[in-house]
Amino acid sequence: MNDVAKVIPLHGPGRPPVHGRTTNRHSSGPVDRRRFREHEAPAAAEATEESDEQPAAEQHGGSPVDSLRSLVIEQVTGVAGYLRRRITGDYEVDEFGYDQDFADSVFLPALRPLFEKWFRVETRGVENIPMHGGALVVANHAGVVPIDALMTSVAVHDHHPEHRALRMLAADLAFEMPVIGNIARKAGHTLACHPDAERLLRSGELAAVFPEGYKGIGKPFSERYKLQRFGRGGFVCAAMRAGVPIIPCSIVGSEEIYPKIGDITPLARLLDMPYFPVTPLFPHLGPLGLVPLPSKWYIEFGTPIVTDTYDAAEADDPMVLFEVTDHVRETIQQTLYRLLAQRRNVFMG
């Protein structure tokens, strides 16, 4: 066994690397999502054998206590297998820093209690995401803290038949923060810039972007579910150049987790933050105010918008970019209105 992780170049055999902003990252085919199933820890295998002998109702738990017990067992066995692979060096990272073993064994399991129990997310239209090949998910952004991006990544991985990894295109701030930046890299995310976006899409990866940026997550509660400006269409340009479809994604529920009723601008400047939010619970209740409210979530993936019908010149045409950008934005906005009309209660759904 090697005592260090193996690095997989994203460019395939016989293909030259595609150079981007940096010299130590390249692009190509997606990593096999099922690779680590062959390397489960013995403890995990034993737990699986035991669960096969139990009735289905007992496996899934007929009460909250049973559900919690199953969740704890799953977490413990997953971490055991993860630690074994860390010790033996039996794991791989790609040239963006994506560590699939870390994402599948640590990152996503840590998010699932929020996804399944706290926000009780319902996922719709996941069949609109391609089984293979590059695609760009474009979603609305809200909630003061970008938890919506994390929940979307869980929705895609857990509900898509191929359990695809969703590679977020995030702002610079996410990678400048200690610890969080390193976790973001290991989870498969990268900077929201043209070179990185195109390289991911051309390599057959599923990427995601939130064009509203800070304007979306930092908007006041009075403007909830009203989409902010989508920029100049940079995400459309990247999709056109890579020839991949754009998947509109509408998220309902994220606006209510931290209702922003104010902003302490001087403090935000002092801390070099885009805003310092004031909510009904924060900062008045201190750390307790950081707990998100348990709103009911819906994540819906819309019909793909094809881009491979445009020629290379149109990818640089401002009018074409504006037209497609506006189409994507309007699709998401109308879907939000429809989902909101169907929702009877913020917390019960």
Image (tube, rainbow, N blue to C red):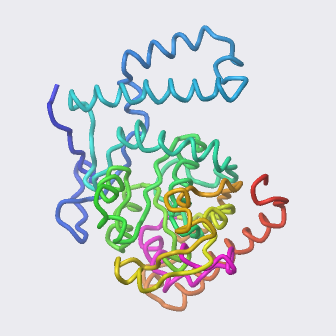
Range of residues picked out in magenta: 217-244
How far across and how far down the image is residue 281, in percent? 60, 65
Q: Does residue 127 appear left or right of residue 291 in this picture?
A: right
Residue at far top of view: 53
The residue located at (71%, 19%) in the rendering is 57
Q: Does residue 318 appear left or right of residue 224 in this picture?
A: left
How far across and how far down the image is residue 153, in percent? 51, 52
Does residue 193 belong to the magenta stretch? no
Residue at far bottom of view: 319
Q: Does residue 135 appear left or right of residue 304 in this picture?
A: left
Quadrant containing the N terminus is: top left
The residue located at (68%, 47%) in the rendering is 120
Quarter of image, res 330: bottom right
Query: In this orientation, which residue lies closer to the viewer: 345 or 267?
Result: 267
Query: In this orientation, which residue lies closer to the viewer: 120 or 321?
Result: 120
How far across and how far down the image is residue 269, in percent? 37, 84
Q: How many numbered discs, if any?
A: 0
Q: Is residue 167 above or below residue 13?
A: below
How far across and how far down the image is residue 27, in percent? 30, 58
Q: Is residue 41 above or below residue 194?
A: above
The residue located at (34%, 57%) in the rendering is 180
Q: Is residue 154 above or below residue 55?
A: below
Q: Is residue 248 above or below residue 32?
A: below
